[in-house]
Image (tube, rainbow, N blue to C red):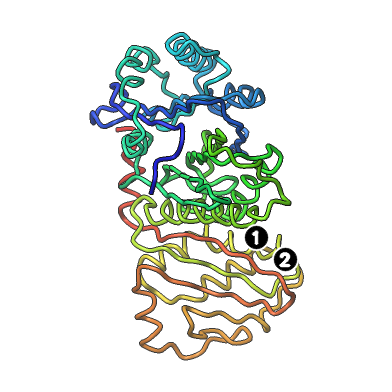
Amino acid sequence: MKNILGFKFSGINCGLKKSKKRDLGLIMSSEKCISHAVFTKNKILAAPLIVSKKIIKNNEIYGVIVNSGNANACTGIKGIKAVEKTINKAADFTNLNKKNFFVSSTGIIGIQLDVNKITNNFDRLFNNLHVKNIKDFAEAIMTTDKYSKIKKSEISIGTKKGSIIGVAKGAGMIHPNMATMLCYLLTDIKFDIKTFRNFINRAVDSTFNCISVDGEMSTNDTVLGLSNGLLGNNKINNKSPQANKIYKSIENIFYELSRDIVLDGEGSTKICKIIVKGAKSFKDSKKIARNIANSLLFKTALFGSDPNWGRIISAVGSTQIKYIDQNSIDIYIGDKLVVKNGLGLKLSKKINQIMRKKEIKIIIDLKKGKYESFMLTNDIGHEYIKINSLYTT
């Protein structure tokens, strides 16, 4: 795939992580970007979100600075000042304005950020900028991730070929709204700002808001979209002939990144797609799917490859949706019917084989309406406990 026009990347170690792994990342565009971000719904917000929420309103972003190893959350006025110092130093270093920089952080909550480790390494960070250093950036934003997450796509627009790239991190504290992670979507395609915002919002809702690893909502979740328009195409709006194709490309990148986050879930060995159909509303189908996805009993059954459908149907009922009728519920594990009208069928060896697979699909049919939705989740086992019980020690 060709390089995305106008964007360069950098990722270095500045000393925030004891492991000496990369912990400071930078994205820079040669031109000002239109931008849109979706943030966590958690009422406890990290310092970079408090500041960046204001900055993005200016719609004049050139650069994104991200540190891992420290979330800069619950750090009070010192945390805010650390973000402001980062932005001011970056503006001085580049001869840009402080409103041209967006900041994100990820890592441990409640520890003051040593901002000097960031700003004192700006020489190395900015001098390492290169179109090919996207993997360095992706590694620099990782925390408990086992691998970096990058997805790319190309779209033909007339005689031109535009690029869309998504980079994300996330493995733990994953739960809507949004999934607990950071994601940066970059494109050289020129957009109408309202259309760009609409595409980002819709794609987040159908992907990152459909995954759960552990039911924990972070203080730092951010999805940021940037478009520098350097492809030089006519602005994409909802009426453009390529609009649907471009939206589907963005949605697919988000879906693949969200899927990678679930696959990379702390200590996970499996990914499960839970489909709830036959509901009277989309909201109800989503509520049931989320309830199952967040059930520790269900997730531990996944880990043990146990086709314990009782844990599934119990999670359906505990939503307390009034029209649920246990005598009309069907449940499938893979393509095998295991519950018919609320009654269990004989479990075959094939069902046990399906439960041992790395990827599993479970379908719950309420048979009460026309709406359906899905959630991606994973299992929880010994490794998740080990990782999270020792996180600060």
Q: Residue at x 43, y 55 (%)?
A: 262
Query: Residue placed at 52% from the left, 21% from the top?
Result: 101
Indicate whether 154 appears above or below 308: above
Q: Residue at x 35, y 16 (%)?
A: 122
Callout 2: SS: loop
The answer to whether the residues at label 1 and label 2 have Cβ atoms under 8 Å apart is: yes
**Mark 1, secondary structure of its residue:** helix
- Residue 37 falls in image quadrant: top right
| Residue that badge 1 annotates | 287
**Amino acid, disc 2:** Ile
Which one is in front, 374 or 189? Answer: 189
Image point (44%, 62%), residue name:
299
Residue 137 screen position, x and y as percent: 36, 34
Residue 371 position (above or below residue 78): below
> Vertical placement of 19 versus 207: above or below?
above
In the displayed structure image, the side of residue 388 where residue 84 appears, left or right: right
**Residue 103 percent across, percent down from the top left:** 50, 25
Q: Residues within 10 Å of mark 2 (few under 14, many from 20)?
A: some
Pick the quarter of the image with the C terminus.
top left
* Residue 357, image x, y percentages: 35, 72
First along the sequence among labels 1 and 2: 1
Give the residue pinned by disc 2: 321
